[in-house]
Image: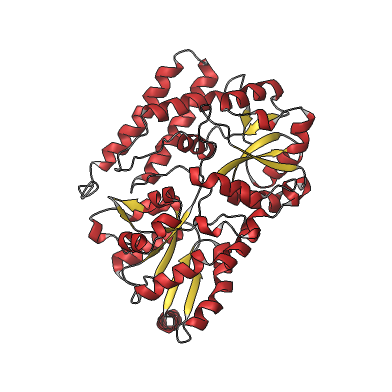
Amino acid sequence: MAGLALASGIYIASRREQKNTADLRLWTFAKPHADAYIKMLPDFERKHPNKRIDVQIVAGEAVTSRLQAAFWSNLDVPDLVEVEISWAGSFFRGRLESIGFRDLTERIHQTGLWERIVQARFAPYTTRGRIFGIPHDVHPVMLAYRRDLVEKLRIDVDAIRTWDEFVEIGRRVTIPGKRFMMELPPAGVSSFEVMLFQRDGGYFDAQGNCTLDNEIAVQTMRYYVPLVAGKHRIGNDLGGGQIFTRALEDGYYLFMVAPDWRTKVIEQDVPKVGGRMALMPLPAFTPGGRRTSTWGGTMIGITKRCADPELAWELIMHLYLNKEALAQQFRNTNILPPARDLWDHPAYDEPRPFWSHQPLGRLYASLAPQTPPQYTSPYISLAKAKLSEALIACVDYYNRYGERGFDGFVRQQMERAAAEVRRQMRRNPYLHENA
């Protein structure tokens, strides 16, 4: 016991010493982000020779749980934090003045960031009209596809304008058990979300109201389920990791949803298909409609415990708006930065051999301004869970009964999901405060 007490004391003392020697501490959950920032720090510290910046990796969901605990206890609160988009809303409970992040709304408008950055990307980090985070990315979505197989099947991707056209081709070329037009999960909601956002739907609206049962959400579910269920399905999902690698190598999937970040994952995980992959915009739901969506994201925020918010703001500008550094970061990660004026760098026009020599950056940059907003809420995690339950139920129903009674069942499931979210939301008396 004495030994443990001594060891704990030494650890706590060392942590305090570490905390006191850094002028700013930044938490991030993403190792690629941390690696990039560490490379960018020397230039920043040369401008501030007496300041030391500490970048710390806090794994996955631990960012959320650990930071919430730090806010509640007022201990070990970092100065800046990167938060994944699905978890950002969890910090927006209670009164505005109780939120642990600094309100950046005025600063964003005064510095011109509102005009520079794709404005839809502020939506997930906004509550009751106030902005608490700067977006790290845009994550526009395209379709990645096996160009060699698509050409062999005589599919003209340039002629595909709408999802209906895509689905029609998919039903012609899909051979269940051997080849599917598209990687589409019948249980996970990631690809469903892409379609939902593309149609200007979502979990919540700009005022924080749950919209899971509005007509857009109902019709998206109605459209999606027959793509992954029933005898005419065109999509399937075997899983990730080595299973996905083998499926893509073997031509089990022809197309797959590909936000910018996922193109790097494919490059790293499935190198054998290099030179045989290509990208195209998403088909639109209506002729002339939006041909992209969004999947994933990250914000950075300044905590209220930060003793030097001016220095913290300077650091954000250095890490998030440094044109040369971000161009190199794009080469390493394929992640498009959110500020439009950064996209004129030659890096975004470079042909990529893996992607059939397409200029990957320019393709994503051309679609990024159309990226739809994602509105958030402290109840976003609950809403995602309820949507997943509804999707599983609808897929099971369709596999059993097909079209018979399906419209009514979809509406019932979406209304049930939304009702549960609203029931929990009513327990929060501050949610619509200052809305």
Q: Could you say which quadrant of the image residue 302 lies in?
A: bottom left
Up-down relation of residue 232 to residue 35 (above or below): above
In the image, is 136 to the left or to the right of 67?
A: right
In the image, is 221 to the left or to the right of 326?
A: left
Q: Could you say which quadrant of the image residue 226 lies in?
A: top right
> Whole-percent x and y of residue 117?
45, 55
Tell which residue pokes out farthest to the top in this image: 404
Up-down relation of residue 99 to residue 219 (above or below): below
Q: Is residue 191 visible?
A: yes
In the image, is 250 to the left or to the right of 189?
A: right
Q: Looking at the image, which residue is at 48% across and 76% down? A: 54
Up-down relation of residue 317 to residue 277 (above or below): below
> Whole-percent x and y of residue 134?
42, 59
Q: Looking at the image, which residue is at 53% across and 57% down? A: 337
User: Which quadrant is the N terminus positioned in?
Assistant: bottom left
For this rendering, which residue is in front, 79 or 435?
Answer: 435
Tell which residue pokes out farthest to the bottom in this image: 50
Q: Looking at the image, which residue is at 63% across and 44% down? A: 240
Q: Tell how many labels.
A: 0
Q: Looking at the image, which residue is at 41% across and 55% down? A: 115
Q: Is residue 57 visible?
A: no
For this rendering, which residue is in front, 46 or 124?
Answer: 46
> Whole-percent x and y of residue 258?
60, 43
